[in-house]
Image (spheres, rainbow, N blue to C red):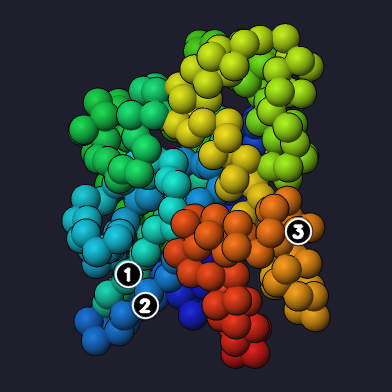
């Protein structure tokens, strides 16, 4: 979720016990009439999440969602988020590869989908929990209630270090540290498993292939460079981010983000001046 100051965006860190699973909690809030609308884009980084919505229906890629709770699976491309009227949403963002500890189903079954708890048979996200979250007066009280429920759910379950195989966690960290530019055959040598085994681990726990996760990491690195190194040419940025040439950079970047690197830089500069 990008910073959205006009929507009262807040981001909170999880407690120490939940930090191996949760990247952050976030909230957006706007008390406004139906004439107000906002369009934002959520760029993929390999994670999954949960959205609790207590305001007007939210639209994801043009589809209205009226459920007060949605599970958002991993995505290959940016998601268009449209908000109308009153906005009051609370979210959980899981680290890539950790959502399955709470979502149970293989993440490959959730790829590109936004599903209700009923569709996934998730007892964690009960109607009673959603109703209690809705009436909490502050964000911190919502987070406290939510963390209590998450910790209860984890109690008695296999710890993360055993549930998600060490090879999977090592591979995710390796690709992330290499900013998606490492050669995967070298990774296979380091963790001593076959490519087929690695593919299966990624499909179950991430919902994406190791190759596509690498593309997301390269694209994410390129986004950072486009925002920060405003004097560097697009060709130099593409090369530094691990793309073969400018045509390859533009093609892969647009496939994930939805717009060209040049358009992304222009939008980022415009937003910085607001």
Which sits earlier in the primary sequence, circle 3 or circle 2?
Answer: 2
Residue at (58% x, 47% y) in the render: 216
Identify the residue shown where x is 39% and y is 29%: 108
Q: Residue lying furthest bottom in this view?
A: 274
Residue 66, by quadrant, is: bottom left
Q: Which of the two residues, 74 or 30, is positioned nearer the viewer here?
A: 74
Element on which disc 1 rests: strand
Q: Earlier in the sequence, mark 1 or mark 2?
A: 2
Evaluate if marks 1 and 2 touch, with contact meaning CB atoms under 8 Å apart: yes
The residue at which mark 3 appears reads as: 239
Residue 205, above or below 234: above
Badge 2 element: strand
Decide: is 78 above or below 76.
Answer: below
Dividing the picture into quadrants, the one containing residue 35 is bottom left
The vertical placement of 148 against 265, above or below, is above
Residue 60 left/right relative to 45: left
Q: Residue 135, image x and y in percent?
A: 33, 55
Task: Locate residue 225 relative to residue 86 in the image: left or right.
Answer: right
Q: CA distance from mark 3 to mark 2?
A: 34 Å
> In which quadrant will I find the C terminus?
bottom right
Residue 209 x %, y %: 51, 31
Report, in whole angstroms, how far the alpha carbon at label 3 lies from the one at label 1: 34 Å
Question: In the rendered image, which residue does mark 1 sit on?
Answer: 82
Of callouts 3 and 1, the N-terminal one: 1
Crowdedness near tag 1: few (<14), some (14–19) or many (≥20) residues, C-alpha within 10 Å: some
Which picture quadrant has residue 173? top right
* Residue 184 visible in the snapshot: yes
**Residues packed near mark 2 inside 10 Å, few (<14), some (14 to 19) or many (20 plus):** few
Q: Report, in whole angstroms, how far the alpha carbon at label 1 lies from the one at label 2.
A: 6 Å
Report which residue position mark 2 lands on.
38
Q: Which is more foreground, mark 3 or mark 2?
A: 3
């Amino acid at each position: 979720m990008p910073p959205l100051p006009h929507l009262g965006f807040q981001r909170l860190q999880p407690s120490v016990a939940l930090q191996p699973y949760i990247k952050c909690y976030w909230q957006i809030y706007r008390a406004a009439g139906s004439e107000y609308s906002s369009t934002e884009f959520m760029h993929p980084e390999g994670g999954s999440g949960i959205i609790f919505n207590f305001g007007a229906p939210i639209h994801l890629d043009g589809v209205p969602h009226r459920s007060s709770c949605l599970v958002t699976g991993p995505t290959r491309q940016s998601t268009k988020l449209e908000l109308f009227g009153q906005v009051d949403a609370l979210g959980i963002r899981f680290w890539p590869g950790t959502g399955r500890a709470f979502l149970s189903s293989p993440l490959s079954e959730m790829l590109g989908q936004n599903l209700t708890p009923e569709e996934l048979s998730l007892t964690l996200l009960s109607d009673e929990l959603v109703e209690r979250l809705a009436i909490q007066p502050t964000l911190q009280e919502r987070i406290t209630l939510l963390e209590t429920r998450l910790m209860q759910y984890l109690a008695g379950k296999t710890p993360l270090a055993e549930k998600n195989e060490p090879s999977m966690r090592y591979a995710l960290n390796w690709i992330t540290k290499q900013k998606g530019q490492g050669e995967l055959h070298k990774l296979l040598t380091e963790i001593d498993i076959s490519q087929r085994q690695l593919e299966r681990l990624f499909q179950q726990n991430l919902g994406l292939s190791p190759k596509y996760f690498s593309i997301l990491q390269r694209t994410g690195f390129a986004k950072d460079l486009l925002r920060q190194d405003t004097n560097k040419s697009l060709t130099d940025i593409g090369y530094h981010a691990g793309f073969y040439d400018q045509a390859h950079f533009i093609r892969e970047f647009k496939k994930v983000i939805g717009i060209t690197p040049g358009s992304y830089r222009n939008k980022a500069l415009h937003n910085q001046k607001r």
